Amino acid sequence: MNQLEQLKALTTVVADTGNFLQLAQFTPRDATTNPSLILKAVQSPDYAPLLKETVQAQRGQPLADIVDHVLVRFGLEILKVVPGRVSTEVDARLSFDRQATVARARRLVALYEAAGIGRERVLIKIAATWEGIQAARELERDGIHCNLTLLFSFCQAVACGEAGVQLISPFVGRIYDWYKKSAGSAWDEAARAGVNDPGVQSVTAIYHYFKRHGIATEVMGASFRNIGQIQALAGCDLLTISPDLLAQLQASEAPLQRQLDADAARRMDLPPVTFTEAAFRFALNQDAMATEKLAEGIRLFAVDSGKLDQMIESL
């Protein structure tokens, strides 16, 4: 049994891609997308006709509406391949606007429903800013389930749990990137690998806290740089993995051991914490890594959203 099959016995495997033509070979349950992945996909000749067809069908509509139709069209194609859910992201440029995020999320879900897809198969991806978390709180009350992304800190995770968010995507690789860059020549790759990886440690702490306190929010590790990070989180609720790393797991026959255990977490001595808006903002501010990576992530997604806008306008 290869490592991908072993991992699926412990964890729900999600494909992190907008390339739905690649999905079938890995048989993931769910799939996630983001503006960068969609932009990468539509630049491929395989997807150019789909983009052009979707844009032409919406000719004359406001640009934001056309973009949402493109995102949902990709989501619909993905849902033909995966049996579970697809995550579709709200424009990162709305990350600090609760009302606009809610409105955009409702429109995305309405487009899916108009195409015959129930909202139980859709997760709306929102950046885990305070405003994004409060938008998700409102959406969840209406049965629109959310995936809070760009999550780098414990306070973001706890606030999402308190808001009743369906799923969070703590970013392993980007946390690793920050600590490696910060350490410079002092970085010891071997000593900070596996369970000692700072990104792995962040997700592990969140997972343990959620299970200890019965928080129903699903924990989905994301943004991996190597399969060692994935192996060190075997047992997590879900892991969203790029096609390249899925292929590496599929190519290995080495034994894979469970690392995260919900029953063990329930016995841990982890006192409950809570975050008001002021406490959340201060805790995030005190975490230089999370502050920098959240801001950077929003900027990068916003840039790619702008590039997608330009591509659509050129058609």
Image: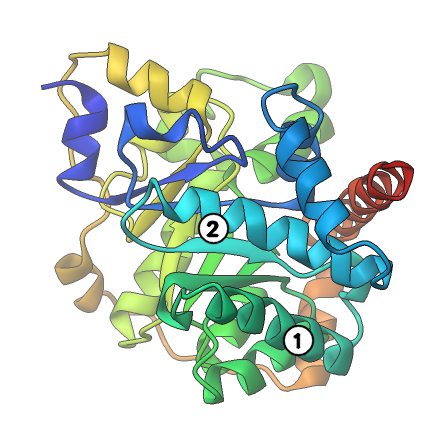
Residue at mark 1: 280
The amino acid marked with disc number 1 is Phe
Residue 258 vs 87, above or below: the answer is above
Q: Is residue 171 visible?
A: yes
Q: Residue at coordinates 89% horizontally, 44% vertically from top-left?
A: 313
Q: Is residue 98 above or below residue 284?
A: below
Q: Position of residue 108 (x, y in %)?
A: 60, 67
Left or right of residue 259, residue 140 in this image: right
Where is residue 160 shown, x and y percent of the image? 51, 73
Q: Label 1 neighbourhood size at 10 Å, few (<14), some (14-19), many (20+)?
A: some
Camera-near label (2 vs 1) is: 2
**In this rendering, is residue 255 above or below 138?**
above
Image quadrant containing the C terminus: top right
Q: Mark 2 touching mark 1, by CB under 8 A?
A: no
- Residue placed most toward the observer, 107 or 234: 107
Q: CA distance from mark 2 to mark 1?
A: 36 Å
The type of residue carrying mark 2 is: Leu
Q: Residue at horizontal 26%, vertical 17%? A: 250
Q: Quadrant of residue 96?
A: bottom right
Residue 146, can we see it? Answer: no
Q: Residue at x 68, y 40 (%)?
A: 53
- Identify the residue under disc 2: 76
User: Which residue lies most toward the left here?
Assistant: 1
Image position, residue 110 (x, y; %): 56, 73
For the residue labelled by badge 1, is the local secondary structure a helix, a strand or a loop?
helix
Label 2 SS? helix
| Quarter where residue 277 is shown | bottom right
Q: At which x and y percent is residue 224?
A: 49, 31
Q: Nearer the viewer, residue 273 or 151?
A: 151
Density class for disc 2 (Cα within 10 Å; few <14, some 14-19, many ≥20) is some
Using the rendered view, name the quadrant where residue 102 is placed.
Answer: bottom right
